[in-house]
Structures are given as structure tokens and as C-alpha cells.
Image: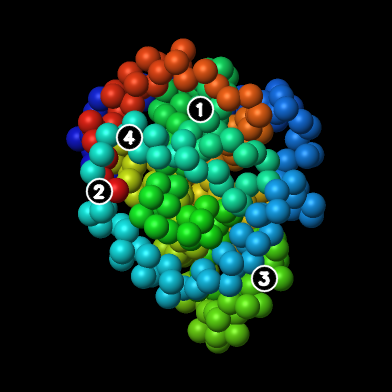
Amino acid sequence: MNTNSFEAVPLKNLDEWEEDLLRRYPDPDSIATSKTTDEFRNYDSPERDTVKEFYRLNHQYQTYDFVMKKREEFLSFSKKEMPVWEAFNFLNELVDDSDPDTDLDQFQHLLQTSEAIRRDGHPEWMVLVGLMHDMGKVLCLFGEPQWAVVGDTFPVGCAYSDKIVYPEFFKHNPDYDNGKYNSKYGVYKEGCGLRNVHMSWGHDEYVYQMMKNYLPESGLYMLRYHSFYSWHREGAYGHLLDDHDREMLKWVKLFNPYDLYSKNPEPPDWNKLRPYYEDLAAKYLPATLKF
């Protein structure tokens, strides 16, 4: 991690805030203003027809080899360089086909998430996590299909958990019957740590790699694993975790309600919010980002 880029980040109150963390977990009902929390992540009968078809494609084609290929292709960040607000302009055109809870464009969802975090008085770096957590979806800008960009993430290279949404679709994945990849540990070892586990390719890993020099470790876990629902929501893959993952889980669980329950059909007023977020981005991020 580039410690030089960290010196300007106002983290002096982080230790004090972390001690109070467990007493400050958000009440999901206070965030969910458009519907009850039980109505979110309804995959049995999603409101949008795209959701089930999305996961059929995602589970069929997200193989270990596919992930390795995409990491090599995109993690050099040599495609484009642009200001963060130019990237947000692209997100204004994207509606996530995997999301059963909202048909707002992605930038509006990011603002709803970051505003909910800000209202609860969390540090500025966490507000920035809310603003940036889906920035990796600009992968669609480079012609990537949504099944290779969005949706719940999961480890590749080992057996698929039945806690993943629509697990029945994995039967069509070539790795499902591959003896190298379909055992409990696959290519990994017990307690190897998530940093040594390759996740299905998508926007989580991409934005983590993009932001890893600008945010504290707790924020980076929020970015990297916010779509890993079978872990942070269902408790799967405990055999791959190390002590650091178990310590960081509380941060991912803290972030999740803001990402999930802040979705509201009423779009935020960007004209009013713009000065604050432009100042926030300028405080933490360089003038341009590499994609």
C-alpha cells in the first residue's frame, strides 16, 4: 500500500470510532425508506425479468480461467485515464441487470448510499466508499457484458457454495465437473485468507485495485467484498478465511445495509449535493483515475 498517499487522509479518530463500532451498526429499517427490509434481494420472484437470466449467464461463464484472463486484461489499468466525474457520467447510462431492488441508474444509487452513510455521521473516507463502491461498473464502458461486471461474487477455483444465489446454474459451468476446481478447497488451502482467493470477476475487485492506494484497509474490504453475500450474509467459505478476514468482516457488514437498503425510487438532487462530493473526491483522489 502506498503510505505516501495516506498521509493527507484524516484518520485520527479511526481507533476511537472502531471501538464504538458494534454499538453503531445501522438499523436497516431506518435506511430502508421505500419498502421493508424483507422485500429486498427477492430472488424467488424478482420484479425485473433480467435478474434470473443474468445469473444463469454469470454462473455458466465465470470460470477460474476466465477470471485469470480478465485480471490480466484489466488490472494493468491501461485502457483509459479520465476524471472521476467523467466516469460517473457514464454510470448515468447504466442500470444493473442483476439488481432486483432498483432500476435507477448507478450514479443515483451511489449517491443514495453515500448520503445514508453521511447522515449517520460516519467518517468521510466511508462516505467516499459509498460514492465509489460501484465505480468498477465502468467495465461495461469497455464492452464487457454485465454478467462479467455486476452481481454477487463468489470464489472460483473451488466448490461453489449452495448459499450463492441460484446455485443450480453452476451445473452448466465447466469447472463444476473439473476435479481440479470442484473440491472443498480446490486450488486453495485451509485458512489461506481471502487475499489469496480469486473471486468471480467483476466490479468489486476492479474498484478495489483502483482505490487501494487511497483508502484505509477497512474501506478496501468494503469495496472488495461488498458483493460477496454468501460470505458476509450467509456465513459460507469460513474454511478459507484467516484471522484478518474475520476481523475485517465487521466493516463489510457495517457497509452492507447502506448499499442494500438505501435504494429508493426517488433520485437524489445532484445539484445540491455536487459541491460537497466534488470537495470530498478532491481531498482523497488524484485529478484523474486510470481505468
Amino acid under label 1? Leu
Q: Which residue is mark 3?
A: 169
Residue in the foreground of this view, choosing between 28 and 254: 28
Cα separation between marks 3 and 4: 36 Å
Between marks 4 and 1, how big is the CA–CA gap?
A: 15 Å
Colour mapping: rainbow
Q: Residue at x 37, y 15 (%)?
A: 275
Image quarter of the N terminus = top left
Say which amino acid is labelled 4.
Glu
Mark 3 to mark 2 CA distance (whole Å): 34 Å
User: SS at mark 3?
Assistant: helix
Q: Earlier in the sequence, mark 4 or mark 2?
A: 2
**Which-is-in-front pick, marks 4 and 1?**
4
- Cβ atoms under marks 3 and 1 closer than 8 Å: no
Q: Which residue is mark 1?
A: 111
The residue that mark 2 highlights is 80
Q: Would you say residue 135 is visible in this rendering?
A: yes
Q: Which residue is mark 4?
A: 86
Q: Is residue 21 left or right of residue 208?
A: right
- How far across and down, in percent of the image, does residue 231 sit? 61, 54
Q: Kindly report the distance in space between the C-alpha atoms of the residues bearing marks 3 and 1.
A: 33 Å
Image quarter for residue 109? top right
